[in-house]
Amino acid sequence: MNGAARRCDRRSVPGVVRSHRALAGAVVVLVLLASSLTSCGRTQQAPPLALPVNALASVLLDADGRVLTVLQEQNRSVVTLQQIPTTLQDAIVAVEDNRFWEHDGVDPRSIARAANANAEAGELIEGGSTITQQYVKNAMLTPERTIQRKVEEASLALSIERNYSKEVILEQYLNTIYFGDGAYGVEAAARSFFGVPAMQLTLAQAALLAGLVRAPGTYDPRANPNRAVERRNFVLDRMVAVGRLDATAAQAAQAETLVLAPPTSTLMDQQNSAPHFVDEVVQSLLRESDLLGDTDAERYINLYRGGLRITTTLDPYLQFLAVGAVNSVLPDQVRNPRTPDAALVTIEPGTGHVVAMVGGSDYYGEHSYRQVNLARGTGRQTGSAFKPFVMAAALEAGVSPTKAYSAPGSITHRLAGSEPWTVTGGGLGRATMAECLVVSSNTCFSNVVLDRAVGGERSIELSRRLGLDDASLDANPAAVLGTNDVTVEDMASGYATFANDGIHVPAVYVTRIERADGTLLYAHAHRQEKAIEPETARIMSDVMGQVISRGTGQDADIGRPAAGKTGSSENNVDAWFCGYTRQLATAVWVGFAEPRRDSSGEFTPVSMTPPNTPIEVMGGTYPARIWAAFTRAASEQLPPLPLFDPASIPNATTTTTTPGSSPLLAERVQPPERRRVPAVAGVDEADAVGELEEEGFVTEVIRVPGRGRTGSVLAQSPPPGTQAPTGTVVVLEIVSGPAATGRAVPAVVGLSTIDARRRLLDAGFEVIVAAGTPTDPTTAPGTVIATAPPAGATSRDGRVTVTVAAEPNRSIDGG
């Protein structure tokens, strides 16, 4: 007969009922024993019952391998029985289950004692559980106190004892029980209360921990030190009584003063440096990753109890710089209602690694809305930051960057089946597509997107290939020009594709997942796709480089090759700067996260204009400054690489697992050469046109009345000396005859320079443009603020001087 059979062959019940008052308790004893014996007979041939795995914390690591945060439900560190001192083992056994080494998992003597106590109380107040039963209760069963639950507990305890040694059971128990102070298991308890591993516990410390098991709150040494010491001393006396300790050692331990380690937060409680990044990783693993299970419940259990080591892409130094850049430009975001919120995402173009993320400020503060990740979510309106995707779509369709489009101060498009679409901002008269991007002309780009070769659908489709994969993007022309909502991460990903010669690498947050035993569960495999031709990406980089050097993004100048684009949504609700160097692509959004009540009591988005903000916030202000502060600091240890390298092109196969290179293509479209516009004022029309075309420029002639020789150039735009790409349209004003005299000057104050000039020229006046400072600081640059003679007066010599608002380095459309 084997050991299990011998244990199940016990037929007699000891006479342990000591009182008639214990009749009810005796019934419990009989039920439990009968159940136990039945269980023995029923499960003797069954496979061994598997012990549950103790919950272990999973750890998120940054890219340097340092702990970013701990994901766990319980503060627990699992150790082997050999790592637990025998004094602690003996103390636990003495006070919790002195007959542990003798019984079969259920102890009739303990049950009888508990039954007597329950009968006296008239209710179930004591269970008489063995260590094995306590382990079953803590690790395998729900906590209700019913006879049915006690029967199930006894049955499982007997099954475990038949299949596992006492040492295995004790080890599991000591790693499972709760000691208070958030500590599960002896290792966590030792470190929590005494700041040492379990093996370094003294006898007095071991006895104190053993005394906590019965009632961790009652005997909490921090809250109730006197009661905890009394309980410790009781445990020591108990150890002597059962022969586990001699009296002398017990007395010495009882004389020790209680000294606790200072309370410290667990890693689980500590505030990490990238809370929104951590949230995104956790939600991604719970929501999408089939690596951790097929159901939400399986993924949750494995993530929070599986002891995983998850290596992420976060660069701790770049994260520090990102937070610092936001705070340097927008200090006191929490307390100052005039300071808007900000979000930032940085991606390595060649790897897709998300290396920094700021999803807002004050994540750990009192307002729960600040835990919302502003870098993700549903996105915000992009404004002019979307224009590069439109231009790239045009280039892909064969449109030259030097193609000229009409760019008036205001234009109304009447589209079939739609309401009239009025666009304002960016009066250039007529300009190339490239120049329109540099100065962010809205009217020009409305004509680009309506070009039959381009269109909204093509623009949206291209943007998705580059990384803006939100299916809700609208191809309506107005939406394409800036009213679509896009996340900060997707904008960073899209611009990273421009930086990577048109090769898109999806955003990556996690590179490696290992189990607690070191087994590799997941290793990220690099993926990349050709989104656009390298030549297209390079032209875009050249033009967006000019956005920083001379256009709307001059506050983003970092003194090394970089490219980017500003963006502002309607009423200055959202402001963007998205840009890149060869090594890093970063998108920055600024705006108020929460709407506010307007004068009618309705919640509306907050316009970033005075008095809501100290300044009128556009893409070229706060966002560009944050981008520059971060990118300048992040690039200090990096070489200043050119935006594109003609000697190296990444492999552009549809899908690859490793980055590669390919030979140079035989022919490539290079960015247009930049040349100085010659001075042709006073020159005859034919000679002027010839000289300009010889330099590679395109001419457009406007005939105007004025003083001077008929047929000669009266004025030119761009002005002489301007460095412009070959193919740029140079508008020549040719004298058609004498200027009008004695006519009333039309009203042009409030119009753009271009529109005012055209209206005056149409009326037959010679126009002279002068710069002036407006009395209203919100007046847009290029707006006419005065004329001489004033409107309604007559000009004796046929001339009208137009004074326009001038402010250097400011966007035509606020983009």
Image: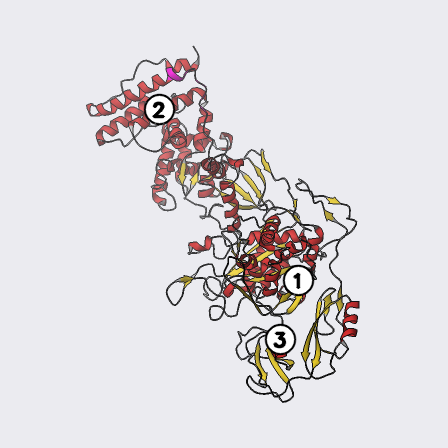
For the C terminus, the image quarter is bottom right
* Residue 43 is inside the magenta segment: yes
The magenta segment: 40-51
Residue 649 part of the magenta segment: no
Of mark 2 and mark 1, the one earlier in the sequence is 2
Q: Which mark is residue 758?
A: 3
Query: Is residue 398 visible to the viewer in this orientation of the structure?
Result: yes
For marks 2 and 1, give the one nearer the viewer.
1
SS at mark 2? helix
Report helix, strand or loop for mark 1. helix
Q: CA separation, marks 2 and 1?
A: 81 Å
> Tag 3 or tag 2, which sits nearer the N-term?
2
Return the residue nearer the eye: 576 or 209: 576
Q: Residue most toward the top?
A: 1
The secondary structure that most of the magenta stretch takes on is loop
Q: Is residue 133 above or below residue 660?
A: above
Q: Mark 1: which amino acid?
A: Met
**Residue 433 tag number:** 1
Q: Which mark is residue 154?
A: 2
